[in-house]
Image: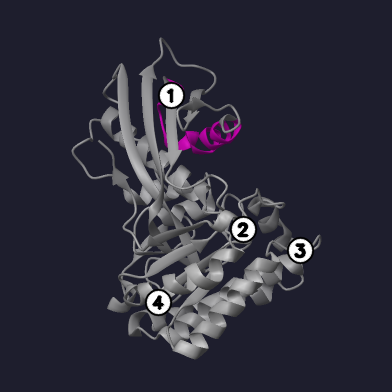
Amino acid sequence: MFEPLEIINSLSSCNTAYSSPSNIALIKYWGKHPVQLPANPSVSFTLDKCKTETRLKAEKTSGTLDYFDIEVVVDGKANEDFKPKIIHFFKRIEPYFNFLKDYRFKIETSNTFPHSSGIASSASGFSALAACLIKTEQKLAGDESHKLNLNKVSFISRLGSGSAARSVQGPLMVWGKHNDICGSQDEIAIKYDHIHPVFHDYQDVILLVDKGQKKVSSTVGHGLMNNHPFANARFKQAHDNMSALLIALSEGNLDDFIKITENEALSLHAMMMSSNPYFILMKPNTLHIIEHLWDFREKTGIPVSFTLDAGANVHVLFPNVHVTKVLELINTKLIRFCQNEHYICDNIGDGLKALS
């Protein structure tokens, strides 16, 4: 889909730096096929404050290597644990770049949120790294004056982490082919702008129920959809929910937005609980929070809702106009269900940003 650019500048060194946010899916994708293509379309809010900052330093080698020379530094310390993932990523993306074995790379990365917070650091991390690599390619190709190729960033990000394709722009990103969305495709995520103003300042408060590592990786979970007895019904449900959500987003219909997105969150976990082998990632405190949110919404009429990723933590979604009352609920009723009373306040963001 993307040809590598011709390298015309043999720079001895090249530095680039980008930040990229995480994202939270409203329509969930669960299940994929090679290579890193979604079994159903998804749409996500791009976050703002929960992001990864990555600096890429490329130093020219004396000749073309027969391996990838990579150093990974996380939060200022050398980290060998992430290196195999990065090397695997480089192997996947090698056909789309002409310089990966001509340079020695130092990747310095840090998150603005805790690594164990259950926020998709792979999404923000791979999209930030992809942006750095593509900007480096543009410099080496003498194409530095042009804007960053965001479609290629999404494409390359996806080869590291599927959800990373959706972290490139904001406020919403659609990934996966859907008949109601012109230009939607499985290879890249596209920006989605057809939303009512009520969603422009939407808030996402992440309640950290469990900051431990997940017992089942997302990669394993996606794979279990291959033989799942309800897979086809789930994929159809995602398509149908996407069609309905697009209408709710354009009209500002918060009742429908809540019904669809909460249904999606619970459907995701239903797929996990009915797979073989089966697993449960929600915790008792996850359910306590959901019940409190439902009770609060019924009593106050405030359109606060939840969504879940493949984990125990709860994303509390609501318009900014209600932030005072929702935070009061969190600090008086819900904080006791959070591990060490930790939660993170975030909101909709715009995606990638170049760092000085």
* Residue type for callout 2: Lys
Q: Which residues are magenta?
A: 84-102
| Image-quadrant location for residue 7 | top left
Secondary structure under tag 2 reads: strand
Q: Nearer the viewer, mark 3 or mark 1?
A: 1
* Residue type for callout 1: Phe
Residue 183 disc label: none
Residue at which label 3 appears: 227
* Residue type for callout 3: Asn
Viewport quadrant of the C terminus: top left
| Residue 133 x, y percent position in the rendering | 38, 35
Secondary structure under tag 3 reads: helix
* Image vertical order of residue 113 relative to residue 14, above or below: below
Residue 325 disc label: 4
* Image vertical order of residue 293 relative to residue 109, above or below: below
Q: Is residue 6 visible?
A: no
| Image-quadrant location for residue 4 | top left
